[in-house]
Image (cartoon, rainbow, N blue to C red):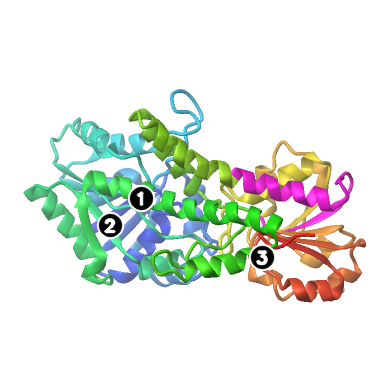
Amino acid sequence: MKICSIGAGYVGGPTMVVIAEQCPEIEVVVVDVNPERIAAWNSDRLPVYEPGLEEIVQKIRGRNLTFSTDEDEAIRTSDIIFLAVNTPTKTYGEGAGRASDLTYIENAVRRIAQVATTDKIIVEKSTIPVRTAEKIRRILGTNPHHCHFEILSNPEFMAEGTAVEDLRNPDRILIGGDDTPQGKAAIQKLVDIYAHWVPRERILVQNLWSSELSKLASNAFLAQRISSINALSALCERSGADIDEISQAIGADSRIGQKFLKSSIGFGGSCFKKDLLNLIYLCEHAGLTEVAHYWQKVVDMNEYQKHRFACFIEEKLFGTLSGKKIAIFGFAFKKDTNDTRETPAITVCQDLLEEQAVLAICDPKVPESTIRRDLQGSPSENIQVVQDPYEASRQAHAIVILTEWEEWVSLDYAAIFQNMKQPAFVFDGRNLLDAKQLRAIGFEVYGIGKPRS
């Protein structure tokens, strides 16, 4: 068997790498129209940073794993084709700012329809709106060779920063397909691939529409939990309660559980906001106004949390940030990734820059070019990007923790304190550091959902 992924990004790349690792008898090809991205996959500096990913690629690349720009050859020779291209939020026309832009999906499917000369199984791996398979089926029906295509939905549920572990040991594998003999046969072929390493009871089979909607629903529920705990964090700060203690009490309820109850400056990444906006648009399109409003509030609370944090920094720094140096520790949307898509750091930094603060930004994995691109439009002369957190904090008025990198925990804060402007502040947007130890050194420390004076 030969399979390919059209798309070599955060979804297609790691997914195919782990399939190739676990299924050595299957030939796996990852194709992308971006030659620079493919060149990076074939180099020692992968375009995607995930713990453990580089080691697997180095071990199996060139054996049963290939990265290529020859999309047509991959389409012609593959039995199963995964669609793992980007599905961003539309920025134009009907549904702008909410609906998914399916341009890349349509382009890939049209290419399959033009090039394929044998029957194929097409797997939706990208996050897509429910009923997208209908559109794919219509386009594939234009194939001049009258090939038969079975369409399956196989949404990804890996989290950035733990993608390799999530793919190797998933909570579940979801496969949706048609309840026909041919549909069931296609489903079984995909089940057999995952069954190489995933226990059969974790492989869930559904109809196409349930599988397509399940991805949006899962991300909506996770984002809702984050916005819920962050909403409570604001009340904790006003009432004297401690959000970590509240989270512990809530999570001890077996009906709720402990995951995604960590307060922060808000969620980021490529999925949560995009999928919520898509879900909101689908609800509005279906005439479900109240349902759309409910999910919109999850997005609104996330935006509120980011702006609230930036406003508090200004308030505590005596009501003005003009000309003040602030050290920003972390820019990625979470630790163990170099992804900055929808990172809360962008909003917080932009708010601080609008108040004419001078930012010294430090992140162990995000390159300077990415940081400056994401903050484009803000005054560049007020943005410094440095590799050393000690240098970033030198003569700074405050340190702001925006990403929960473990590197920040082991720093010598006594030495840092001596080289900062006094009084020296720490605003911990991830509740990562030991506030008591920092206060003993002399810092004024403020966290999310912690009692504030």
Seen in the picture, residue 56 relative to 110 is either above or below; the reply is below
- Residue behind mark 3: 431
Q: Is residue 370 visible?
A: no
Q: Which of these two is toward me, 435 or 420?
A: 435
Segment colored magenta: 303-332
Q: Quadrant of the C terminus?
A: bottom right
Looking at the image, tell me whether mark 2 or mark 3 is earlier in sequence order.
Answer: 2
Element on which disc 3 rests: loop
Contact, CB < 8 Å: mark 2 with mark 3? no
C-alpha distance separating marks 3 and 1: 29 Å
- Asked if residue 311 lies in the magenta stretch, the reply is yes
State which quadrant residue 146 falls in.
Answer: top left
Q: What residue sits 33% from the left and 30% below the top?
A: 286
- The three-letter code of the residue at mark 2 reads Leu
Residue 97 in picture, x, y percent from top left: 50, 32
- Asked if residue 21 lies in the magenta stretch, the reply is no
Contact, CB < 8 Å: mark 2 with mark 1? yes
Q: Is residue 176 left or right of residue 235?
A: left
Residue 321 in picture, x, y percent from top left: 85, 46
- Residue behind mark 1: 215
Furthest toward the right, the residue is 422
Q: What residue sits 38% from the left and 57% below the top?
A: 157
- The three-letter code of the residue at mark 1 reads Lys
Furthest toward the top, the residue is 93
Furthest toward the left, the residue is 181
- The three-letter code of the residue at mark 3 reads Asn
Q: Is residue 297 visible?
A: yes
Residue 240 in picture, x, y percent from top left: 70, 62
- Residue behind mark 2: 174
Marks 2, 3: nearer the viewer: 3
